[in-house]
Amino acid sequence: MIGFANSRVSFTAKLFEINWLLVVLIFLVGLVGVIMIFAATDGVWSSGASQHFTRLIVFGIVMLGVALVDTKVWYDLAYPAYAVALLLLVGVEFFGVSVNGSQRWLDLIFIRLQPSEIMKLAIVLALARYFHDLPQWRVSRVSGLFVALVFIILPMSLILRQPDLGTTLLVGATGITLIFLAGVNWKIILSALATSLIAVPLFFRFGLKEYQRARIRTFLDPTIDPTGASYHITQSKIALGSGGVSGKGFMNGTQRQLEYVPENRTDFIFTVIGEEFGLIGSLMTMGLYFAVIALCAWLSYQCKHVFSRLMILGITTTFILYIFINLAMVMGLVPVVGVPLPLISYGGTVIMTVMFGFGLILSAHLHRQNDLPKSHV
Amino acid sequence: MKLQSENIDSAVITRRTAFLGLGVVGGYGILASRLYYLQVTKAEDYRTLSDNNRFNYNITLPSRGRILDRNGEALAINRQDYRLILIPEQVKNLDATLEKISEILPLQAKTIKRIKTDIKENASFVPILIDDHLNWKTFAALNLKTPKLPGVIPEVGEGRAYPNDGVFAHTLGYVGRADSKDVANDKDPLLRQPTFRIGKLGVESAVDKTLRGKSGKLKVEVNAVGRIVREWPEPNAAAEHGNDVWLTLDAELQRYGAELFEEDSGGLAVIDVVTGELRTLLSMPSYDGNLFVSGLTQEDMNKLNTDERRPQYNKVLSGGYPPASTFKMVVMLAALETGLVNPEDKVFCVGKLRSGNRDFHCWKRRGHGPMDMRAALKNSCDVYFYDLAQTIGIEKIAEMGRKLGLGEKFDIGISGVKSGIVPDAAWKQSKLGAAWRGGDTFNASIGQGFVLTTPLQLAVMAGRIANSEKALQPHLIIGENLSEAGDLGIDPSHLAYVKEAMWSVCEEPGGTAYKPNGLGIKGLEMAGKTGTGQVRGISASERRDRIRKNKELPWKLRDHSVFVGFAPYNAPRFAVACLVEHGGSGAKRAASIARAMLGRALERDGMAEPIATAREAPL
């Protein structure tokens, strides 16, 4: 408490106190991305790999900057950030730019913003602060739960309208996870589970119009999807499977070379890992992710405040969900949804969100002993 | 309230984190076991699938053998052909793709319908032809566009082409896409290739197996949109090209024949009287076989179908025509062979002969006066032959006709050869259910009535008379369909008599086809016989007043002009038969063409130098 409570503590000392292990792990995952993008683009450094590397450095610096900001600032910004993100989502609804039939972007002249990405972090901040402020006894009460659910449902419904089912579910799952972590009564959890098991099919049958049902069926069963999602999955499985235990060797993947797997620079980059480095490479990549996840859980455990703990866990949850959904999709376990493999897939938006998130995690850990206000709702 | 204002217990968060941690580990377990399943258990299967993705065995088309004339001149060749094909399984949106193609290469509704039918009827990996015979400009433009159109592939292949403006069309036939019947009869995988062409008619069809060759296999590495990235040629897998086929025809001579025909319609055959090789086999007018290769337009089709001269009809092989007076040699030989007739005996021609209550007329209304056999042929006196036929009867005549090749369906390898009709009592009974009458014999004796022959048969007849020893067999494709020529079985002295009479027709003043120096070759003479085939009945009233001249009649009612002959007279080399549909008197149109053909054939054979004067005025 002494020393680090003082905000005027020397910059270098503070920098030194950052959890560098996490920084190194993140950078390693990012490097896997650089190498695999390099392979996926037939060894053309400039068609993705170099950009990915640059982003890694730039957003790495942003991450460290975020880490150095006192958690209290993030605590204070939690609700405003959530409000801004919500407003931006509403803005998308009216002024958004449509890309590929989906209205997700907001053109702010100097930058193209994807408010749903901001919301991924804002929802964690907002709920972490909400539960931080909430007295224990209200967590399992209707009043306490109701506000938390409104926090979740508002952005979900806006993102669903874009439409972006993947992000909607991601935000929802993260929110629900945070409610669970906050210690909601098991009885409520189980009864909610039971209710949804009954309600969802009923809603599907009676609450939806036929065309909406058709849309959901298409989403659940790619074989009836005319856009060829099943083709993606088949080719993706062939790429992984033909890699075998040890893989075909770096830059030797035929599925990749012959462009059988679409989007293998972005969402399907894991197929390149699986094809060229086999089971060994795949498991090593997953192991690297596991190290990041485990370390984050450990960092959360070391924190004193509910806000810090939940923020770390919430962001980690988003990270885990990204990984799980992407891998399950690539391996043909779930339908194709446009979810990238964080830090490895090419694409600026996600790497920015994820690394900003890790900045918050590092910040929470760095300022784990600092005081936070205690203002009950 | 104050007691309950405690913050959320950190221990709860830890417990729940641990709980979720178990979930994460469980999720990792599922993902890892799935990876194990894909990359270890099923690895072999997926490796095979990956190779399937990577490699395709493309069927490579053999080059079709050429068709050559006897001197090696190509009558059917392969030309570079630019075309566009489509692989249905790689096309995402067919309509949009076809629309994109249409921006450069306009596709008719008919073509689009055909493409869609093809797609429906074939497996999705079978390439479908969009269009062929593209010009270079279109092809180049398509090459720029197709990289953005998965499944659409521009290709350079070989296409069949027939030079010579169709002079050989009836004989060569043409090639076309294998239809369902072809595919059912022939299991060669080549037939399923969209750009493969199979012989449809004529020589192309008859020796298709020889010309076709064998398909090859080419292992190619293809990318996801089917574009070939690399080729992996394997030894022994190359296509075996088809063999060239040589014909007995003389291209130069046949072209000359077509020239001589001008706008007329008919058939012309020139045959080697020693070997039976056909030097010319021409049906006029002809059509352009190239049109059939590239796909006939409705306009072309209508043009061919509405022409009253029937360009598609192979008149030289399939056309049954009354041989008219050229049949008189048959009657003559039949009579001489019976030994009942003395050729010196004269018959007095008064222009007609009465049989029962009917008059049978001679072409010369006032009659020829006294005629012996030689004079009767030279002047083509009908009355003499009525009398002769009456003496020997139809059976002997029919027998001789068959000996000389009439009524026979010769196997020259290609389809369309017809047998014609050599009538006798049995034939009439079975075909018409009526008894043979004396009048029928009269009509037959001058090659009218029921007698029908093809120009090919007439050429063989002339050839057999000229050869005098062997029953000449016509022959078209070198090395194929050779049949041994048996003995003719006719007394050579009788043949000599007939040949001499035929000589007098052409070379003696007063003969129906007499022309001084007719062959136009010094020291060589020809022999032959004219015929004028009547295609209309002449009423008694018309005969009484005045028989209308051919020029006064509509084309369809004019007489057929026929001529058969051979040369040189003293050492026969070639025989010819020419039939000009509605060409009027045989002495004119057919005789002049046949004469010029014989002259040119001998000249090309190196038999003789042409006479300079004759050259200046060939006809």
Image: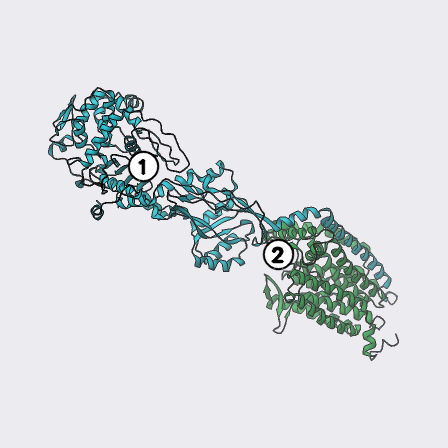
What residue appears at the point 31 percent right and 33 percent down from the top-left corner?
B460
Nearest the eye: B530 or B352: B530
Q: Are marks 1 and 2 on the same chain?
A: no
Of all chains in the rendering, the one displayed in cyan is: B
A80, above or below B463, in the image: below
Nearest the eye: B522 or B215: B522
Where residue B236 sits in the image (x, y, percent)? 57, 44
Residue B271: mark in rendering: 1
What residue appears at the point 59 percent right and 63 percent down from the top-left corner?
A99
**Quarter of the image where one finds residue B519:** top left
* Position of the N terminus of chain A by quadrant: bottom right
A194, above or below B172, in the image: below
- What shade has chain A been given? green
Q: Helix, strand or loop at disc 2?
A: loop
Q: Which residue corresponds to mark 2?
A: A259
In this view, the mark in front (1 or 2): 1
Residue type pointed to by label 1: Ile
B189, above or below A109, in the image: above
* Position of the C terminus of chain A by quadrant: bottom right
Nearest the eye: B38 or A183: B38
Where residue B579 sits in the image (x, y, percent)? 26, 37
- Report the chain holding disc 2: A
B599, above or below A240, in the image: above
Q: Helix, strand or loop at disc 1?
A: strand
Q: CA distance from mark 1 to mark 2?
A: 64 Å
What residue appears at the point 19 percent right and 33 percent down from the top-left corner?
B504
